[in-house]
Amino acid sequence: MAVNLQTPIDYLKGVGPNRADLLRKELGIHTYQDLINLFPNRYIDRTRYYKINQLQRNNADVQIVGKIKSFKEVAQKRGKRLVGTFQDETGTIELVWFRGQKWIKENLKLNKTYVAFGKTNWFNGKFSMPHPELELLEEHEKNLRSAMQPVYPSTEKLSNRGITNRMIGKIMQQLFIETNGKFVETLPDYLRSELKLINKQVALFNVHFPKSQDLLSRAQFRLKFEELFYIQLQLIIKNLVHKSKIKGFPFDNVGNYFNTFFKAHLPFDLTGAQKRVLKEIRADLGSNAQMNRLLQGDVGSGKTIVAFMSMLIALDNGFQACLMAPTEILSVQHFNGLQDWCKILNINIEILTGSTKTSKRRKIHESLENGTLQIIIGTHALLEDKVKFKNLGLAIIDEQHRFGVAQRSKLWHKNTSPPHVLVMTATPIPRTLAMSVYGDLDISIIDELPPGRKSIKTVHRYDKNRLNVFKFIRDEISKGRQIYLVYPLIQESEKMDYKDLMDGYESISRDFPMPQFQISIVHGKMKPEDKDYEMQRFIKGETQIMVATTVIEVGVNVPNASVMIIESAERFGLSQLHQLRGRVGRGAEQSYCILMTSHKLSNDSKTRLETMVRTNDGFEIAEVDLRLRGPGDIMGTQQSGVLNLKIADIIKDNDILQHARHHAKSILKIDPTLALSENNVILNTYKQLSKYKNIWNYIS
Ligand code: ADP
Ligand code: MG
């Protein structure tokens, strides 16, 4: 009989309650199944031995054959460390233990031939290997199965408590003994033969105990495919269910407002990309399903007018629309922009933010409820329970990475039936990642900038060149341009950052004295009114220089500002740098971005700066960002489960992801409920996975 893979790990021979506890806590391994799915991070060649004189200072795992010649105890600040001198025919290294010293001394034998395995450190002209794995050579040779020995994920606690890599290997072996290595196939035959995938049993065996490099590669491919296939299947099903279950308001009319605006009042010709995206949105709004769309477009690509025209469609169908932005400044800017168009079209529009006066607020609440107010712009204030709509048909969220998923759904529930939702972001997410993270969102992309934009020239300058930079500022101001000067503001060092900002402001004020020059300053600690006042002065052109923290990061539109100077640019992330740079280059003039840094730069900082200097393409920048930081920081990834991947890598295994998605899609197209007998295997696996939530933690 097959062993039940849901058996708790405690029952596996050689594990026992203590180890089981550690495995649960440290690696999340509760059952046999979890253990099988503990895949090696990498493989090392344990048939390869290094000589001590071949060691490099790169801190990689190595194996050395040699003898322990002596032990000594060395006192240190706290306690002592045990040092063994390990010798081969080419030299000596030190083996070092900070813990478990008694056991080591009692159990290791001097002058016997051992294989020492571990990472080496280079210190004071000598190599050492802290906490090595040691095995007598003869035993090592007996145990040696292949050149590719798996290295399993581990934690410090595990290795401290004696659950070494070798121990995990042994437990894994025991698991294969108890189960006879028999595992249920999870992909249907037709798919396996079409894609030439090896079967599950062979794959699992070879991923843990590779017989050859070729089999290992095929095993990995199969398991990665499977993992990504089921995630994609899940996402696509979720999307299909969403579309069939959640009815949207069908906006059948493209009527008066839209047509009048389009025919008579368009301030400029729409770009091809804007037209395409509007078509996509119109198709969604006209269908019976609720729209749930992500609109990606680089800063300055013209998302606002697309948003506005989408709202007009809602209004044409007798519904209200709202636009929510993350900051007061942005909301005001949107409001000011849209107000003019609304006036022409005779549309009622209002703005609601934290600083809206009570009397005004009450009026807004009222007119939203009785439906006389057609468009409302605002901040989080829109989410308050008091805000009720007569019939909200379309909710637009700008720069969504500032809003959590929970907030999105709060807007959603403001109606008996959910409104259509359009989420706009200027932080491009590589399409493939977006696909796997937002399987439930449809995606539109504006990938074309309005005509006539000159691409922004970006340079990197060291602090010591500040005088030249100041001279450049002076020249630009004399041409009538305006300048942004931005300081980082990082939570942890807030005090220091404010000091930097104020110091910077003072020094700038000295170099650019009044009355010839006027300077605005805006930061997070100011009252909204003061912020707004300073902002307005800059927008109106009364000040030439705007000194700010990243408050201005999102959305502000001052076409005459043509120079963006970013102080301590090495401290900003790539997407933030790109966002900031997007504040300039909005007018007809040549614009510049100057990245100021100190001389001390980490490799990652260098890559970020080089990338900024090389390209203006938001998607390219997003790809680099993803490579540098991994997907963890990108919005939505936390919830999506792509971080819980067991074997596939969302970035490196992109090709496999595409494959997997393609097949999941075409299978569901033919057999949306997985009812065909040939898809039995898929249905069962899918149910099983959902039940035990292996990689499905993100199902809400
Ligand atoms: P973002 O996508 O960053 O929100 P905006 O909607 O603020 O961009 O547009 C940036 C600027 O480009 C605005 O001044 C807007 O009026 C202008 N703009 C947008 N679309 C076009 C277009 N098709 N032709 C010319 N200018 C445009
Ligand atoms: Mg915008």
Image (cartoon, rainbow, N blue to C red):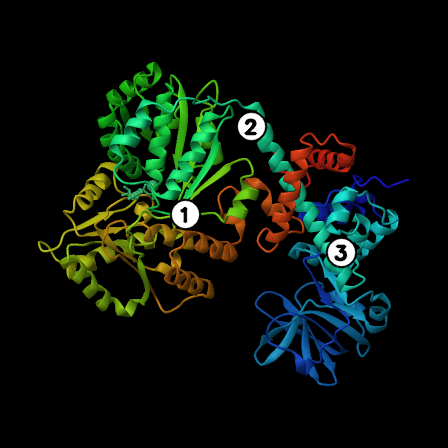
Q: Is residue 25 above or below residue 668?
A: below
The residue under the point 46% across, 26% down is 286
Q: CA distance from mark 1 to mark 3?
A: 42 Å
Q: Is residue 471 left or right of residue 71?
A: left
Q: Is residue 491 left or right of residue 90?
A: left
- Between residues 154 and 86, which one lies in front from this camera angle? 154
Sequence-earlier tag: 2 or 3: 3
The residue under the point 63% across, 44% down is 662
Q: Is residue 337 left or right of residue 404?
A: left
Dot 2 amino acid type: Lys
Mark 1: which secondary structure? loop
- Between residues 183 and 548, which one lies in front from this camera angle? 183
Sequence-earlier tag: 2 or 1: 2
Disc number placed over residue 319 in the picture, else none? none
Query: Residue 208 in the image: x percent, y percent?
Result: 77, 56
Mark 2: which secondary structure? helix
Q: Is residue 176 above or below residue 421?
A: below
Q: CA distance from mark 2 to mark 1?
A: 27 Å
Q: Quadrant of the N terminus?
A: top right
Classify the position of ligand 1 by quadrant: top left, top right, bottom left or bottom right. Answer: top left
Q: Quadrant of residue 613?
A: bottom left
**Residue farthest bottom in this picture:** 90
The residue carrying mark 3 is: 207
Q: CA distance from mark 2 to mark 3?
A: 39 Å
Label 2 crowd bin: few (<14), some (14–19), many (20+), radius 10 Å: some
The residue carrying mark 1 is: 447
Dot 1 amino acid type: Asp
Sequence-earlier tag: 1 or 3: 3
The residue carrying mark 2 is: 243
Mark 3: which secondary structure? helix
The verdict on label 2 being within 8 Å of ligand 1 is no
